[in-house]
Amino acid sequence: MSVEATAPGKAILFGEHSVVYRGPAIVLAIDKRAKIIAEKRSDKRIHFDCLDMGFEGYFEGDVYVPIRGEAWRGRRLQGMRVAAWKTLEHLGQETGLSLTARSDIPVAAGLGSSAAICVATVAAVGELLGGNLSKKETCDLAYEGEKVVHGTPSGVDNNISTYGGVLRYERGESIERLELGEGLPFVIGNSRRKRSTRRLVARVKALREREPKLVDGLIDAMVGVAESGLEALKERDLRRLGDLMNINHGLLASLGVSIARLDLMVHASRGAGAYGAKLTGAGGGGCMIALLNPSKVEDIRKAIWRTRGEPHVVNISNQGVETRRIK
Ligand code: MEV
């Protein structure tokens, strides 16, 4: 028997970076998903087939043994490995596993690819072993994998990937799932510059240590923008949402996490008629997100192409993690 689990990527509308310190992030699950297929093995290995990303291998203890692709690729598997291992430990089971990963979420682009992989891994292994894991258990175990990838992440990525839809997420608080009815029109622009969330979070932390008053002022402003953004979202006031996204981009740029290519895509989208546009995720590369009137989709796609970005029209996905037995 094998089990397939899929989990969505995400786009943060408000609150990236500030959520690490305080206040909410408002985050959307998007209709791009990671898929894990899990099967038991007769040996004790955890074997990974990530051939879409060009590699395959297994771990012997902590050591990665490549079958195809270079040995350094093993680093990319640490989150998935820990997610699988913590799930086995949680269920008190010892077995070898074959895990096949496929994903249409761009990697290292701020769209929650690593969290979606961790969440889908936990769900697939849990279902395979009859663990009957709750969503909360799935989310918490996936967070263990996320910690290996990102250091001390806020938890926003594994939560949205588990629950789907639109969430107000605040560290240590209960999450609020927002019922928004009809999808909102968004275009994402990928700068195609990969970056590390861990490094960007560390860069903001270092700036805060050097300039505590100023950076705390920026974080407070971002918290205010996120709370106002939540109101605008509930009222479906797209014009106000757009203004708040623009303000949020300025604040993130002040923290030093934007780059020229993101700024170009943001300004090109606004120039082509978006209500608002901002970087999304940790910044430093990765993606921006624009909110628009559906009649403007083509104009904004073209505007992003012209800056050499890669546009993706995305919809909110109400489906969080899902599993099914496939034979
Ligand atoms: C990453 O998707 C969002 C950040 O706020 C980091 C985090 O919340 O852990 C930059």
Image (cartoon, helix red, strand yellow):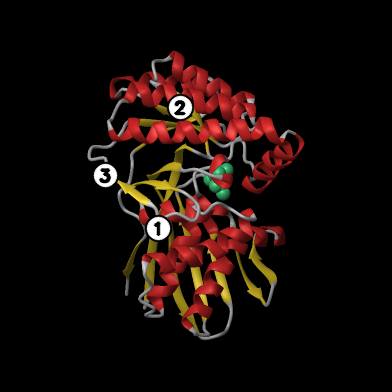
- Above or below 276: residue 217: below
Looking at the image, the residue that sits furthest to the left is 181
Pointer 1 local density, CA inside 10 Å: few below 14, some 14–19, many at least 20: many
Name the residue beneath numbered marker 3.
179
Front residue of 48/149: it is 149
Pointer 2 local density, CA inside 10 Å: few below 14, some 14–19, many at least 20: many
For the residue labelled by badge 2, is the local secondary structure a helix, a strand or a loop? helix
Give the percent coordinates (x, y) of residue 40: 46, 80
Name the residue beneath numbered marker 2.
245
First in sequence: mark 2 or mark 1? Answer: 1
Give the percent coordinates (x, y) of residue 269: 45, 20
- Name the residue: 51% across, 28% down: 248
Foreground disc of the pair 3, 1 = 3
Give the Cα separation between the discs numbered 3 and 1.
16 Å
- Above or below 240: residue 178: below
Label 2 amino acid? Answer: Met
In this view of the protein, can residue 108 be seen by the observer?
no
- Label 3 within 8 A of ligand 1 by Cβ: no
- Above or below 236: residue 175: below
First in sequence: mark 3 or mark 1? Answer: 1
Pointer 3 local density, CA inside 10 Å: few below 14, some 14–19, many at least 20: few
Quarter of the image with the N terminus in it: bottom left
Give the Cα separation between the discs numbered 2 and 3.
20 Å
Name the residue beneath numbered marker 1.
162
Give the percent coordinates (x, y) of residue 141: 50, 67
For the residue labelled by badge 3, is the local secondary structure a helix, a strand or a loop? loop
First in sequence: mark 2 or mark 3? Answer: 3
